[in-house]
Amino acid sequence: MPGTTIPPVAHYEPPPVTKEESVDYADFPIIDISLAKTAEGRAKLAPIVRDAMRTYGFLYVVNHGLTEAQNERMTDIADIPFTQVPEAELKQFESKIKEVGSYRGFKPRQFWTIDNGVRDQIEHYNLHHPVFYQQHPHALQPFLPEIRAFAEHNHYNILHPVLRLLALGLELPDDTFVKQHNFEAPGETYGIHPRTEEDEINTKNVWMKGHTDIGTISILWSQPVTALQIMSPDGKWRYVKHIPNGVIVNAGDSMEMLSGGFYKATIHRVFQPPQDQRGYTRLGLFYFCLADDSVKLVPLSQSPVLQKVGISRRCADEDAPTMAEYRVARTKAYGLSQLQKKENGVEEQVVLNGLVLKHYN
């Protein structure tokens, strides 16, 4: 993070952690990513990360090099678009989601349909690299150097080590995935607001339907409102526990396609928090990682591991989209197009070249 004089920012007071003891939490590994700096450490972590991403598609990361104070400041900065920018100004930066399939800029609330006519209460401000060439609200501009540094920290100190470990898990050279991830991936901040009791009833308390992410790896900085749930291997929804200054890492569709189904794109959703946290806004810092736009999402069939266990394809290799094609198609489709209801609450839509996107309601 920059060491020069930094501008003051209003402090965001996070909600208290839940005190409810009956919360059913998912159980997945906690990885000390600082160990990945050495070949010996990577050899120790690789099988743990491999098994976690194959079984759950999720893991925790700690000792990532950002202090708790730096984390808190970035959360303060993340709150700026939602609390310190006039609505009229923010409207000038609205994302062209439906038009061009891009989340860049501001996504307002009630843009997506969740269920039974209920629209979402999610707003987010998305920055793409390089952040300095994107137009931003006036209140956010003094903080762009810090945002850029934060993005670089996510990319080089969390994403790249994780990608190296995933490559080792496939018995590939450890820079295999790193070469596909130049510093061009988007990063986002989200705010999710409380809803009315009527909306909770109409959506069965689901704030965001069960889904998988578009990209290869998603990085979520842990925050105290207990609302993120993953579908566990036994088919049950379980909450993800908050770890102060921890990072939650999960695999997305693109990683599942590149790994021939070996690493799982985890199904997750946002659900109503425990009783003692209802009424609070959930503010989160995300770093969504995608492969370079030109990367074709075909399995890395040269992997000795895939040659042993077999490859699971979502489509024929000749029909596989590039990262750019899949990103745009998914972005345009989510929450905006008609879904076909299947059994057990699953809803489907075809997004591109026969690729089916599933929602778990």
Image: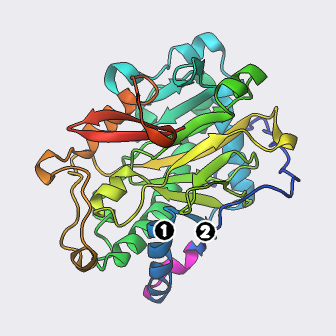
* Left or right, 297 with reference to 265: left
Question: Upstream in the sequence, badge 2 or badge 1?
Answer: 2
What secondary structure is the magenta-colored segment mainly? helix
Q: Residues within 10 Å of mark 1 (few under 14, many from 20)?
A: some
Q: Which numbered tag is attached to residue 293?
A: none
Residue drawn 28% across and 78% down? 305
Count of numbered circles on the image? 2
Front residue of this view, candidates 326 and 24: 24
In the rendered image, the quadrant that contains the N terminus is bottom right
Residue labelled with disc 1: 55
| 162 on left or right of 297 | right
Residue 98 against residue 327 in the figure, above or below: above
**Residue 130 appears in the picture as rendered:** no
Q: Does 36 lie within the magenta span?
A: yes
Tell me where residue 204 appears, x and y as whole percent: 67, 32
Q: Give the residue at x 55% y 56%.
A: 235
Left or right of 353 on screen, residue 176: right
Crowd class of label 2 (few under 14; some 14 to 19; many from 20; radius 10 Å): some
- In the rendered image, is residue 209 in sight? yes
Q: Residue at x 43, y 86 (%)?
A: 39
Span shown in magenta: 33-39
Residue 88 drawn in magenta: no
Q: Which mark is residue 28?
A: 2
- Image quarter where the C terminus lies is top right
Do the residues bearing badges 2 and 1 touch, measured as CB atoms within 8 Å? yes
Label 1 sits on a secondary structure element that is helix
Which residue, as the protein is rendered here, is positioned at the far front?
343
Q: Is residue 137 left or right of residue 349?
A: right
